[in-house]
Amino acid sequence: MSNPLNNPDLIPSVLFNERKGLMQYLQKLGCSLIINLNAEECNGSVEVILNNEFYTIKNPSGKVLTPAYISFGNEKVKIGEMALNDYPHNPKCVIFDVLKILGKSTFEIKPNQSWQFNVAQNPRYSYLSVIEVQTWEGLRAVTPEFALALYLKALKRYAEAATKQQFRRVAIMIPEQYGKIQNTALKVACLQAGFNLVHTMQSPKASNDQIDK
């Protein structure tokens, strides 16, 4: 398979190789952007449809997998590798595991000892939570939807930079345990990130070692 844009940030897809039926379905929905979210590994990857083929997008670090880390330590929020690199020096400003927190109440969330942020009850919706994190301006409460939107917006930006196209619709490969509440929260995050969620699906089986080449 040749690279249609001669761009090293576009590589043939491992996840969707030969998935022609899925491609045709997504094209009918007017969707050519797919995001894979991995809650257990706390990362994500981006796929696009170009010239009737699936391609995987490399992030600015030259990798396929982008850590789902968000750092609020500076006025400009850092995403991915840069946020992960902030964690050893400024852990109280870094959020991760948002995919495990999304759409859950505080009673359903099992805190991770490595979290330096706090999870509290959402003051508007008691069945949901907010994340209390230190920022460059002080303590701030953000919703998991907002934090995930920042991450999704970054992935969208990588795809648009690599393809020179704009994306308004997205299909997302969701964690296996997601239910109705998580999917609703995911739709909110997508809208905040600037696109409409038109389809969700379970991720094809491929290891991170296969994907992150």
Image (spheres, rainbow, N blue to C red):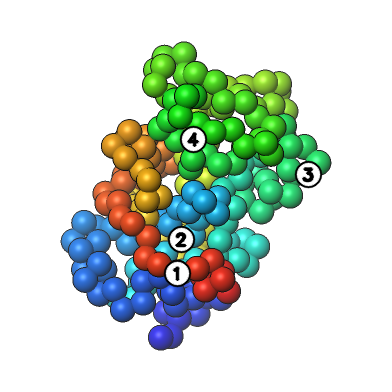
Q: Mark 2 Cα within 10 Å, few/some/many (few <14, many 20+)?
A: many
Of the numbered discs 2 and 3, the one sitting upstream in the chain is 2
Q: Is residue 15 above or below residue 194?
A: below
Which of label 3 and label 4 is nearer to you? Answer: 4
Mark 3 secondary-structure assignment? loop
Mark 2 secondary-structure assignment? strand
**Residue highlighted by disc 2:** 46
State yes or no: discs 1 and 4 in contact (Cβ < 8 Å): no
**Residue highlighted by disc 4:** 101
Residue lying at 21% horizontally and 71% vertically, measured from the top left: 21
Distance (Cα) linking label 2 and label 1: 14 Å
Which of label 3 and label 1 is nearer to you? Answer: 1
Question: Which mark identifies residue 147?
Answer: none
State yes or no: discs 2 and 1 in contact (Cβ < 8 Å): no
The amino acid sitting under disc 4 is Ile
Distance (Cα) linking label 2 and label 3: 27 Å
Q: Quadrant of the N terminus?
A: bottom left
Residue lying at 25% horizontally and 67% vertically, measured from the top left: 22
Mark 4 secondary-structure assignment? helix
Distance (Cα) linking label 4 and label 2: 21 Å
The amino acid sitting under disc 2 is Val
Give the percent coordinates (x, y) of residue 54: 37, 72
Give the percent coordinates (x, y) of residue 85: 74, 49
Of the numbered discs 2 and 1, the one sitting upstream in the chain is 2
Residue lying at 54% horizontally and 20% vertically, measured from the top left: 120
The amino acid sitting under disc 1 is Ala
**Residue highlighted by disc 3:** 88
**Residue highlighted by disc 1:** 206
Distance (Cα) linking label 3 and label 4: 22 Å
The amino acid sitting under disc 3 is Pro
